[in-house]
Image: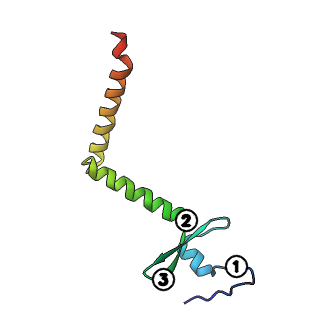
Amino acid sequence: MELAKVTVRGQITIPKEIRKKLNIKDGDKVVFLEENGKIIIENSAMLALREIQDGFRDEAERLNIEDEQDVVDLVKGVRKEMWEENHANND
C-alpha cells in the first residue's frame, strides 16, 4: 500500500512505485474512474488505447475478421471498389 498527502489545493504526488506500475511519465495525464464505489486512477493514454483496441475488436467481429489474411483480403476488396469507383467514368 502506498500513501500520499493531499495539499491545501487538493493536489497529491503519485508515489514512484504507482507511477511505474501505471507507466506514468512527466506530463502524462491521469483519469479518475468510479467503479463499484471505488475510485480508480489510470494512465489516460493507456485507457484510450484499450478503448481503441476494444473498438477494433468489436469491428473485427462484425466483419468476421479472424486473422491477418482476412485483413489483407478486406483491404484488397476496398482498394478494388475504390479503383472501380474512380475509373467508372473513364470507360
The CA span between labels 3 and 1 is: 19 Å
Within 10 Å of the Cα at label 1, are there few (<14), some (14-19), or many (20+) other Cα atoms? few
Q: Is residue 78 above or below residue 52?
A: above
The CA span between labels 1 and 2 is: 18 Å
* Residue 75 appears left or right of 51: left
Q: Which is nearer the eye, 50 or 23?
A: 50
Within 10 Å of the Cα at label 2, are there few (<14), some (14-19), or many (20+) other Cα atoms? some
Name the residue beneath numbered marker 1. Answer: 11
The kind of residue on which mark 2 rests is Ser
Q: Residue at x 67, y 64 (%)?
A: 27
Of labels 2 and 3, the one closer to you = 3
Q: Which is nearer the eye, 38 or 3?
A: 38
Q: Which is nearer the eye, 26 or 5?
A: 5
Q: Position of residue 21 (x, y in %)?
A: 53, 76
Question: Helix or strand or loop: what does disc 3 sit on?
Answer: strand
Name the residue beneath numbered marker 3. Answer: 38
Q: Which mark is residue 44?
A: 2
Q: Residue at x 55, y 65 (%)?
A: 44
